[in-house]
Image (spheres, rainbow, N blue to C red):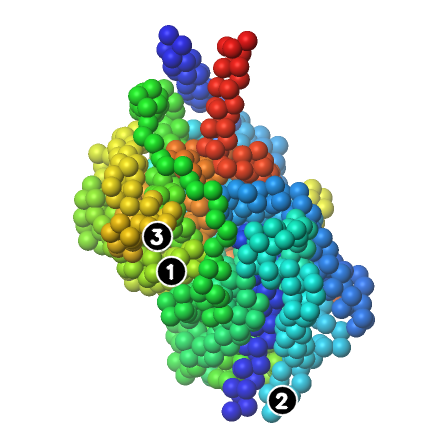
Amino acid sequence: MFKRVRIISAFATLLWLSGAVSSAKADEPIIVGEINSYTRMPAFTVPYKKGWELALEEINAAGGINGSEIKVISRDDTGDPATAVRIAQELVNKDKATMIFGTFLSNIGLAVADFAKQKEIVFLASEPLSDAIVWSKGNDYTFRLRPSTHMQAAMLAEQAAKLDAKTWATIAPNYAYGKDAVNAFKSELKRLRPDVEFVEEQWPPLFKIDAGSSVRAVEAAKPDAIYNVTFGGDLAKLVREGSLRALFEDRDVVSLLTGEPEYLQPLGGEAPQGWIVTGYPGGAVETPEHKAFFDAYLEKFGEEPKTGSLVGYNSMIAIAAALKSAGSLETDALIKAFKGLDVPSSPTGPFSFRAADHQSTMGAYVGKTGFVEEVPTIVDWVYADGADYLPSEEEAAKLRPAE
Amino acid sequence: MSFYFAQLLTGLANASSLFLIASGLSIIFGVTRIVNFAHGSFYMIGAYLSFTLVTKIGSSVPGFWLSVVLAAALVGVIGLLIEITVLRRIYRSPELFQLVATFGLVLIFQDITLAVWGAEDLLGPRAPGLDRAVRIFGQPIPEYDLALIAIGPIVLAVIWFLFHRTRWGVLVRAATQDREMVGALGVNQTWLFSGTFLLGSFLAGLGGALQIPREAVSLQMDMSIIVEAFVVVVIGGMGSVGGAFVAAILISVLNAFAVLTFPQISLVLPFLVMAIVLIVRPYGLFGKAGSEHRPDEEPQRPLRTLTASENQFVLGGLLLLLALPFFADSFTSILLIDVMIATLFAVSLHFLMGTGGMVSFGHAAYFGAGAYAAAVMVKALGIGMLPALLLAPVAAGLTGLVFGWFCVRLSGVYLTMLTLAAAQILWSVTFQWQDVTGGDDGILGVWPSKWASDDTVYFYLAFVFCVGGIWFLQRVTHAPFGYALRGIRDSRIRAESIGINSRFSQWMGFALAGSLAGLAGALFAFAKGSVFPDSLGVANSVDGLVMVLIGGIHALFGPILGASIFVLIENWVTRLEFWRFIFGAIILLVVLVAPDGIAGGLIRLRNALIALLRKEART
């Protein structure tokens, strides 16, 4: 008897639980799911989060999308792709998200992109850089905002080709991003300058560089110039050990992402000078759109925006533009809207999503590292429009798997 | 020639850093037998504290060194407080249970550090007076490297003096060899342990503090150092400080030269060295036989089969689980698939640890082998999902056969560390072998066949395989083979004297546990649609270990409880801000309330209730 009562009460609880998930109504907010590595990579993802929060506030204050507010459900993927997929499942199945955006680490971006394809839901990969997301493993449901590894490497290769340097050494973390970045740079530079030669490669494990040994190995090869892909803690160690051992003296250094405040500012007074980098000059960008963004961000959070903030902000306005243009919450309509979507105004200037490979043409700033009022930043920079560093849409389409 | 000499010096400077953290770990393990994951956290906090102090008072030479020592001392005090408030209460728990507590501490410290110092990397100043390079044979050598090269041997000498010339040190060494005996002679063990923990934490803090002039302080410091520190301790021989010194030099110098010709090797080098050393010298370079075991604990009670009413209870629970998809929303089914897979993984690890007495730090290797086997079969070979699910455990079992052959030749902590080395070597191969495994971009598109792609259908599929797998392992535990394994665990000599081939039985047990973990991995691959090297990483192995230990290693239903609770709490808690702190605190709470695991706690609760009821019935 007692047992039966227990079972019945358990069933009752279950019924109550399942009733709690109500179906979406027309006047309810548009739910957008968001996933990122907030505890694993807080230095990069927290500014990003602030960026999309700012954009979200502005969009909803201006009346949302055709009268409905956007509501973002944001979750921490703990840095694990399997957890990210589970969260995506919850966002889609339980929270009834219209689409998903976010992710920072490339493998998590790829896992969620593959999930999006399987569950037929739109995914905007905001931060991951991996070329595979839009090319070799691209799919119909996934779009990517940030300028990819290939694009940023090509921007640097263009500058590197202007140098006299003939022999090059590379230092890159030993994982997919590092390998992609080195391969893209090599092929682009060889295309522009067939006479260059790559004489040494160092592949330290990510965040475990033995900087002294790597520096000496590069020094031993006596290259004219160095291409660096390390970042974060590895970069700090490399800079310190390298300058102690005079590695960078009389050598050109070209360095991926090092001009982003996330990576450059922690180096403080020891930040290298004159390295050719991609990055973000912050308040020095004086377009009215950027000024408005910069001031609003400073006002809301009491700190200057970082590259992540820019990416987060642009993600949100791109999503809003797509939702507006789709006029419906159906996945097919959203895909159609994203393909070729024009975002006419953003802090970085206009950009669009290419229909052929789903890559946005958002660009990056290319310049040299230097100091402004004792704060390391990039100087002599230009904005490199992403569209100029991508293969043509026909070529890009060939890079994608046949559907 | 001068170039190679300079490279040697670079390696030696790294060796000093590594030695400092490893020596503390080795001392703590030697005396208390605690596998202290929080040691990496002490190292990180030492670095952060020293960063704060150095930027405040460290601009002069005495100021800098005072900051370093002060930071290390503060870390020592933190370690002492933790020993007194947490670890002291759980020394009598089953072997290795303390590592669950230290796992909780790691989570707590991560969030505390983030809250206090912020997310950005912090680059401290260089050491005053040692901020340049000097030329030795024409090669530039940083002065600070030379200082580090000197500090390592100095610390080693001080420790040697402490252990050989002071009464306290002699007692510590005695306790390392025979804790019971030292206690019987009237030495207050409590304070001996506290003192050891203080010293060990101090050394970790010192290691971290001395890194300030070399690298930026970051939130990844704890995890990036801890595994390598364990490796150094094991190569040197657990509890041998001199051994740790030699091992640190061996690894660092090898790495300094290896990157010249084969730069990718850094990923796997420490684990390769550890595997080779352990195969040649089963107790590490300077370890002694027997140093890996802690004093005998109470022998375990023999397992009993379930009573009829308990069987009914289990059956009822399973029926309820079967009915769930009809009532709950589809995400609940998805969550329960994760719970079932984690449970099968934990049960297979429990079979190895609990029944077989072989603790594995690398069980994720077989989970990952199963997942990758399934993924490769489906994507590259075009085999269907069901055959892949049946063949993946075979592949994982074969992996278990290969690694197990080496592992069962060792015992205790050395066996444990060889499983870790095996898993890390497999991880490195997976990570590097891009053509087959896709490297860290993984293998995508491993979704279930069309008929099973619905979440509910896949739920039932996972149910059949997981419950079937768990049932099978319980059967094996109660079969003659299981008795043999338990016999070997409790007394190898007696088991052999009645004709059991102990090594062979353990080897087969190892492979069996591996193949069931592989089944869990294959189910996992299809549930997530993609496989990444993370699935065979240390974090996954440690998760499994925590599930088994927190559930209670002495009960067959322990891992089932542990895995379910672990996955459900993690799924809930990650929604919160500072969830690592909360999760860590929950783990600590469970550890303190139920020092024999949740299952042990429940059994005690039940017994207490029965006793209470009987007493009331009598009055």
Label 3: chain?
B
Q: Are marks 1 and 2 in contact (CB under 8 Å)?
A: no
Q: Secondary structure at mark 2?
A: strand
Which is nearer the eye, B591 or A277?
B591
> What residue is pinned by disc 2?
B136
Which is nearer the eye, B189 or B479?
B189
Q: Is residue B210 left or right of residue A175?
A: right
Q: Look at the picture and state if B453 lies above or below B69.
A: above
> What residue is pinned by disc 3?
B492
Q: Nearer the viewer, mark 3 or mark 1?
A: 3
Task: List the single residue furthest toward the front.
Answer: B185
Q: Is residue B451 left or right of residue B245?
A: left
Q: Position of residue B10 (x, y in %)?
A: 57, 78
Label 1: chain?
B
Q: Secondary structure at mark 1?
A: loop
Label 2: chain?
B
Badge 1 crowding class, 10 Å Cα cut-off, few under 14, some 14 to 19, many 20 or more, is many
Amino acid type of the residue that numbered disc 3 sits on in the rendered structure = Arg
